[in-house]
Image (spheres, coloured by chain):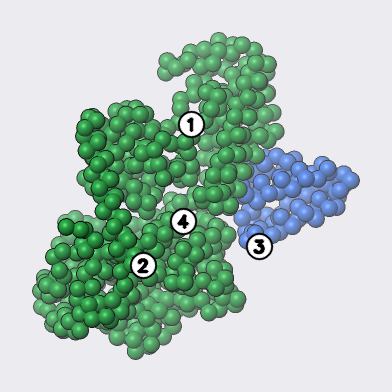
Amino acid sequence: MITQEIEVTNPEGLHTRPANAFVKEVKAFASAITIAKNGTEVPGKSLLKIMKLGIVQGDTVTLSCEGSDESDAMKALVTILQSDGTGS
Amino acid sequence: MTGIASSPGVGAGSVFVLHEREVPLGRTGPNAASEASGATSHPRRGAESELERFTIGQRVAATYYRGLVERVKKNVGADEAEIFEGHLEIITGDDIAEAVEAAIFEEDAIAERAVIDFTEQTAKEFEELESEYFQQRAGDIRDIGRRLAEAIYYGSITDPGELPEDSVIVAEELTPSATARLDTERVAAIATEKGGRTSHAAILARSLSIPCVTGISGLIGAVRTGQLVLVDGDRGLVETDVSRERLDEAKEAIAKNREQATSRRSWSKQAVSRFADGAPYEIHANVSGATEAELADGFGAGGVGLFRTEFLFMRYADFPDVDQQAAEYRAVCQTMSPTPVIVRLLDCGADKPLPYANHEPEDNPFLGERGIRFLLARENRLRAQIEAIARVAADGFAIKAMVPMVVSPQEIEAVRALVPPEASGLPVGTMVETPASVLAIDRLAAVSDFVSIGTNDLVQYVLAVDRGNANVASYYQEFHPAVLTSIKRVVEGCHAAGIHVGVCGDMASHPASALSLIALGVDELSASVASIPELKACFATIRKDALEDLAVRLLAAGSADEARSAAEELVPANLAPWVRP
């Protein structure tokens, strides 16, 4: 299992659109993935639970990935959390 | 029935009541068959059967949301559609399924009750989050719950996307999400119980030229879907007891009006913007979005002199992001290309509060945090808007940014500092609407690429008269010597600095005042789309050299009435060359 602390720089934080993009990406990997903020850990494929973390720009979250493709998954998810939100 | 006239015109057709179908939720427990309201809830047979009802409802709702995503993608935009994709994910995700299953098996709930209890509890959790954005998602979650419960109980979701031809939309209130689902081509008129002239329904209706009456109490109880009604958006009336003959008569009149509207529009489209002696003038349009820009193009506008972005912002539930804004600005520019588009930066506050902006109550909002003051206090919002405009400029469109409520050159410089280097040539202009910007026009012109005078606010600030207060309406005088002198001064200041000066206020939309503006040296008029044909018809009968005399008379006039008469003398009585005798 690998874990990484990430500061969310996406200006929208995990609003509906980026959070859904995050969930879509999680589902594309075989690894078991969780995201945690302030000690609350939720499954990476649960959009509602992720949104209930209320993640905004500047928050620090902890990503954990466990499985055969864990390092690829980590890389892809970090990209979403740190995108500039312009989609380009 | 009487309400508030919110969008002009008369529309007739059959009522389509747009409301949530009531879903009886029953009590939790085995004998949950009746409700206080008298509606009968689904009788619970057993846990397995409830779970199956939920699964079927979930499938129905998922199919509905998939269709919605496609439709929104086509009619509104990909970004907006992605939000509904998120809603689809919530409906089909594990969270809701697990919670519903637990309630069905452990609390003997019926499926509808299990869904609503879960979404209500989730909504409350969202309301407790710190971020305002997440607090507002509570409404989305409740909406999702209601639709899912509807799908379980009725096996379908009422969809305003499947409207019959000539529908009269009747609703308690039209929310932005309901608006996104409307097939506006089939809407003959809109009537709502709540709201007023600035409600979503009214703004949408005006921008699409759909007759609309708002604020009609007791409306929903008085009509039923399919009933024939007539909506008079000029007088704020809804006739509910309409005979076949009356309706046919009205429809005939509407058809005739439509025919005349078509010839008026095609006349305007082909009419060149020249005076009787061949001298050209510039006439642009004021718009609030892409749909109106198409109308502006159809009426032969030579550009957009005022793109009011606040109405665009009002269509969203939260500040639209850079992508969303850029898509909207690009759509308007594509329609108008190669002619220019002036985007006015978000002008909210005072009489145009933005629902999600958290405006603090002010004792004197017209002298408060509005226009550029609002934006400078929230620099990330300003930066996002400038970035969106800059992106469209970098694509090569003739887009310009205009700053509202300016009093000092520093405000223009602050905006310019945010323009990214790849769009450094983006023209930034001043909207002149305060006495300070008139008196300091030389300083402002020195830092501006163009100027446009917003006469509505300028008149109100120069004459110290609230344009919304009926008791002082007679003091609101566009032809007041102080107003005309102010305009003259701004024109001279701009021309001395070698920049273009336009007018985008209401004065540019009426023949007598529009002529006066040209007489005073204004380079460009930006008028409401609907007034362009009459303006072109008027100007075509007048020689430009006649305006020199008008300018002298305007500036010498001792009173507003005297100045107005001087201008009105020039306006011909018949301004409808498109009507064949």
Picture quarter with the C terminus of chain A: bottom right
From this viewpoint, which residue is outermost toward the bottom? B496
SS at mark 3 in the image: loop
- Image spot of residue B222 (x, y percent): 29, 28
Gap between marks 3 and 4, in whole Å? 22 Å
Q: Report the chain holding disc 1.
A: B
Q: Report the chain holding disc 3.
A: A
In this orientation, does residue A67 appear? yes
Q: Earlier in the sequence, mark 1 or mark 2?
A: 1
Frontmost residue, A15 versus B288: B288
As displayed, is residue B346 above or below residue B189?
Answer: below
Which amino acid lies under the numbered mark 2 shown in the image of this protein?
Ala
Which amino acid lies under the numbered mark 3 shown in the image of this protein?
Ser
Q: Callout 4: few (<14), some (14-19), or many (20+) C-alpha neighbours within 10 Å?
A: some
Which chain comes out green in the rendered image?
Answer: B
Q: Report the chain holding disc 2.
A: B
Gap between marks 1 and 4, in whole Å? 27 Å
